[in-house]
Amino acid sequence: MNFQNIIMKKRNGLELDDNEIRFFIKGYTDGEIPDYQVSALLMAVYFNGLNKRETLSLTKEMLFSGETVDLSAIEGIKVDKHSTGGVGDTTSMIVAPLVASCGVPVAKMSGRGLGHTGGTIDKLESIPGFKVELSIENFIKQVKQHKLALIGQTGNLAPADKKLYALRDVTATVENISLIASSIMSKKLAAGSDAIVLDVKIGHGAFMQTLDEAVELAKTMVEIGNGMNRNVVALVTNMDQPLGFAIGNALEVKEALQVLGGEGPSDLKELCLRLAVEMISIGLKIDSASARKKAEESLGSGKALAKFLDFIEAQGGDADYLKNPSKLPSSSKTIDVISPETGYIKAINALELGLCAMSLGAGRETKESKLDYASGILLNAKNGDFIVKGQTLATMHLSDSLKYDPDIESRVAGSFEIVPDKTDSSTKLILARVCESATDFY
C-alpha cells in the first residue's frame, strides 16, 4: 500500500477504507511513515473531515495500537468520567469518590494539566505522598478493595494517539471534531471501563466555543462509544466563567473538600451531582431520582468525604493534610485585586484567569515547567454579583521567589466585565445531554 495515495485520496475528499486507516496508524506507530507525510494527511483530514465510519475505524486502530486494560476481574459495572478541560474544574476529585461511596466501582485514568487548564493528577499531587504510578495489577486490586483508584496514562496505552497528538499540536490540526473525539475515546476505551460519562465544556475557558460544536463533539464521542459496545453519556456544560471560586492545585483541593463535606460553591456542587447521577444511574441500574438521592445522602452523611480520604491513603497520600486543610501547600504572598468601579458583574473571562493562574505558577507553560502547588487565584465574586469600587474581586496566591509580573494584577481585574445596571447574568450550568437515543437541550 502506498501512503502517498492515501494522502491524495483524502486530499480529494474521498473516504478512506479500514485497511488504509489501519496501514496509516500501524505504519506511523512503528515509525515506518515519516512525520511530514502524516502531517499532510492530518491537514487533509482537517479540511475534508472524516465520516462516522472513518472516525470509528480511526479510534479502533488507535485503541489497539498498544495495550488495553481488562477490568473484568472487578465486580459490577465500571464507570469512568472525562472532562474536556476547563478553569477551576475540580469535578473529578469530587465525583469519583462520591460515586465510589455509592457502591459504583470507578477505575479512573486522568491526565496532567497543560496551559490554562488544570490536571486532576497535578491537583492530587499537591497532597504530600500521593502517587499515581500504580501497576495495572495494583490498580485493579485497589478498585476491588476500595471501589476507586486513579492512575496516569501509561506509555503503552494508545501510543498512536500520543504520537498523533504531539504532531497535531505543532501542525495546526488540533481543531477537528473527528480527531479530537478519536483521541479522547481511544484513551478512555483503552482504560477498560464499561461506561463513560463525558463532560464537554463550552465557553471562554473551554476548547469548544459554540454549542453546535460542543454537541457535535459529544455526539461523535457517544457514537464511538456505542460502536465499541460501551454505554456513553455526555453533558455539555458551561465554562464561560470558572467553576467554583478556586483556580490552582492546592486551592482546588481545599474547595473539593468543602463540596465533599456537603458545602462549597453551588455551581461546582451541582455539576458534580449531575455528573455523579449519570454515573450512579448506569452503575447501579437505577433511575436518576434514586441516584440523586443516593448522591445527596452520601455528601450529607460524610460518606463521600470518607471515601476520598480512604482513596488518598490507599495511594500513599497523607490524609492528615485533608483533615487539616491549612497544612496543604499555602502561598507565602497574597495580593488582593481591587474592583476599579461599582456595578454588577456581567461576565468573567475564564480563559484569561486560567492564563493568569498559569503565570503565577499554577499551570505549565511547557511540559517541563515546574508547578507551584500553592499558587493560584481565589475569586471573591461571580456573574451577577454586585461589586463596590475598592472591593476585592479576587486574591492572587503566589510565591515570594516568583519573578512577579505586575501586569497580572490588571489582567485579573480586566477579566471581570462590570456594568452599571443589573442585567440577566444567569448562567445555565448544563446546556445539553447527549446519549445514544436522544439529545436534550436545557
Image: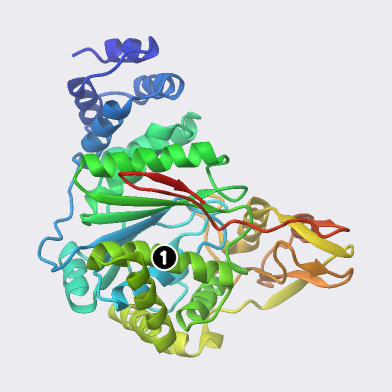
Instruction: Looking at this view, name the residue that lies furthest to the left.
Output: 73
Q: Which residue is more in the foreground, 393 or 136? A: 393
Please state if 309 lies on the left or on the right of 145 as rendered: right
> How far from the left and from the top, in percent, is residue 158?
26, 44
Identity, as a three-letter code, of the amino acid under mark 1: Ser
> How far from the left and from the top, in percent, is residue 208?
53, 42
> How far from the left and from the top, in percent, is residue 147?
24, 74
> How far from the left and from the top, in percent, is residue 394?
73, 69
Query: The N terminus is located in which quarter?
Result: top left
Is residue 390 at all visible to an observer of this figure?
yes
Which quadrant of the structure image shows residue 186? Answer: top left
User: Residue at 21% across / 67% down in the picture?
Assistant: 139
Q: Which residue is more in the foreground, 359 or 434? A: 434
- Residue on which the image places disc 1: 92
Judge whether 161 appears above or below 48 on screen. below
Q: Which residue is more in the foreground, 129 or 411? A: 411
